[in-house]
Image (spheres, grey):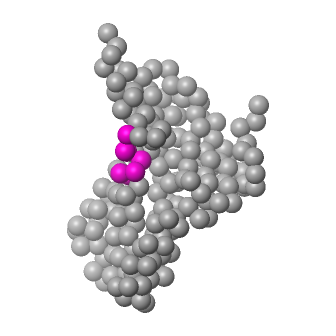
Amino acid sequence: MSLRPAGACLAFRLLGTPVWLHWSFAGVGLGIGVPVGLVGLVAAGEIAMTLFAGAVAAVATVVLVHEAGHVLMARLLSIEVHGVYLAAAGGCCVAGEAGHESHELLYSAGGLLAQTVLLAGTALWLLNGGSATQPMASHAVAVFTAVNALLLAVNAWPAGGSDGERVLHALRELRQRP
């Protein structure tokens, strides 16, 4: 049985993990990038394209960091990682069964933890003044931080098969154990 997805995609390995990059992943950030760019257009037209491009790049980067968090956690817990799919809907780390509810909890939370570490780092950088000499860098990090916070909230929301729902389910299972 092949885990390779159907359709046009680029297959490669990243640190030993199979990655399938669907052609649609290029548009993953459009749902956030377009509104951010429109806000920039209304507020100050000259930075609209910069905000748009920054938001699109931020979404793609956050998806990669999130899935890397799942891969890293799976490897730490000796859960077999089959690969990572990246497409327009985001990413998906495909892994074997966790041997215990605590492993399922940690694996499910891996992406959220990776995003939280990234969010804390960029927020601290901004709170410490960012780059006073390069305000565009501070704007880019601010957009990146806001996009990450939004996606973290979406991923943590306990509904629709999200990581938040999987974490909540694993917590319930652990609580019901004798």
Image point 34% across, 13% down: which residue? 177
Quadrant occupied by the N terminus: top right
The percent position of residue 60, horizontal first and vertical second, equals 52, 61
The percent position of residue 115, horizontal first and vertical second, equals 39, 51
Q: Is residue 137 positioned above or below 58 on the image?
A: below
Quadrant occupied by the C terminus: top left
Front-most of 157 and 141? 157
**Left or right position of 92 against 105:** right
Front-most of 124 and 53? 53
Residue 131 picture quarter: bottom left
Q: Is residue 96 visible?
A: yes
Image point 46% across, 57% down: which residue? 62
The percent position of residue 91, horizontal first and vertical second, equals 56, 49
Q: Is residue 110 positioned above or below 25 on the image?
A: above
Q: Does 41 lie within the magenta span? A: no
Residue 97 picture quarter: top right
What range of the chain is rendered magenta?
152-158
Q: Is residue 152 positioned above or below 100 on the image?
A: below
Front-most of 165 and 110? 165
Residue 145 picture quarter: bottom left
**Left or right position of 118 against 2:** left
Image point 37% across, 21% down: which residue? 173
Q: Is residue 87 positioned above or below 133 on the image?
A: above
Q: Is residue 137 visible?
A: no
The percent position of residue 124, horizontal first and vertical second, equals 26, 62
Q: Residue furthest left?
A: 128
